Amino acid sequence: MHRERVSDNVYWFQSDVYAQVTAGVVVGPKWSVLIDTLALPEEANEIRDFVEHNLQSKIRYVINTHYHADHSWGNCFFPDATIIAHTRCRELLAEQGIPALKEAKKQSPIFEQVEIVLPNMTLDNGEMILQIGKKHLKIIPAPGHSEDGIAISVVEDRVLFAGDTFMPIPYLLDGNIEELRGFYEVVRNMTLENIVQGHGEVILRGEVEPTIDGNLEYIALIEKIARTALRRKAPMEYLAKQDIEKCGKSRILLGGLATGLHEQNLQYVYDLALKKAKAEA
């Protein structure tokens, strides 16, 4: 696992096992806050051990940015912590997370120790301020990637833990494109030193605007491709030719998973365009 100090008493962790997924810790004088947990026992436990032994702190709160497995399935490895999330995150973990974990355990013994632990402090509107020492963590709604998304701003340090609303390639299947666009504009208007993406490297101050613009351009381009595909006799063949490189993203992103995510994005956006065209016909 990779880890770095992002700012004073703020740390970033990145999995070297699955899709460069990230987590973070904000350390206070008496206790710490963990932002996301990763999914695999070895990595969640490694974070806990680092905080307890290297930083000499206990994790009192765990914040789930959303319900997806790689951000929340590690809750169970922090039994003394209060789990904070959007109200919808708790519902989705109960509705989808529990059966998904049951299936995952059939596929791999690596999940044998994992249990779904539902958030016990939920935010109906996705907003909250949590003080830790002299720092304030401002939790805000972060829609677009999933309906339960929240982001966490370390106000004094101008660091934003953005969850999966920020990834090297936007992933659209479980979200809402217009809400994602809106959140990008919210972030654009913040004055940030760093954005911690849900996957991938930390975005530095000078990279924030280009990253937002690049993601918006990618979304606009695949929407244009979807509209063009509707006019083709063989739309699926046309979509298959629109590889990730043509759309301004690299195939090597996220440990090689980016191509598959891009293909799913294209199909999703095409299905939306087809549905809209049928409704207007």
Image (tube, helix red, strand yellow):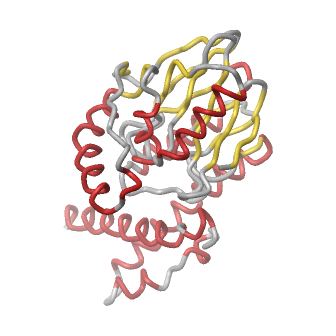
Q: Residue 110, image x and y in percent?
A: 41, 55
Residue sitting at x 65%, y 50%: 1
Q: Quadrant of the C terminus?
A: bottom left
Q: Quadrant of residue 83?
A: top left
Residue sitting at x 32%, y 38%: 116
Residue sitting at x 72%, y 37%: 194
Closer to us: 272 or 3: 3
User: How many discs appear?
Assistant: 0
Closer to us: 69 or 217: 69
Q: Is residue 29 above or below residue 233?
A: above
Closer to us: 84 or 32: 32
Q: Residue 44, image x and y in percent?
A: 52, 40
Residue sitting at x 27%, y 62%: 276
Closer to us: 80 or 122: 80
Q: Residue 254, image x and y in percent?
A: 59, 62
Q: Residue 49, image x and y in percent?
A: 61, 33
Q: Is 240 left or right of 106, judged from the image as shown?
A: right
Q: Is residue 85 above or below residue 205?
A: above
Q: Is residue 95 above or below residue 18?
A: above
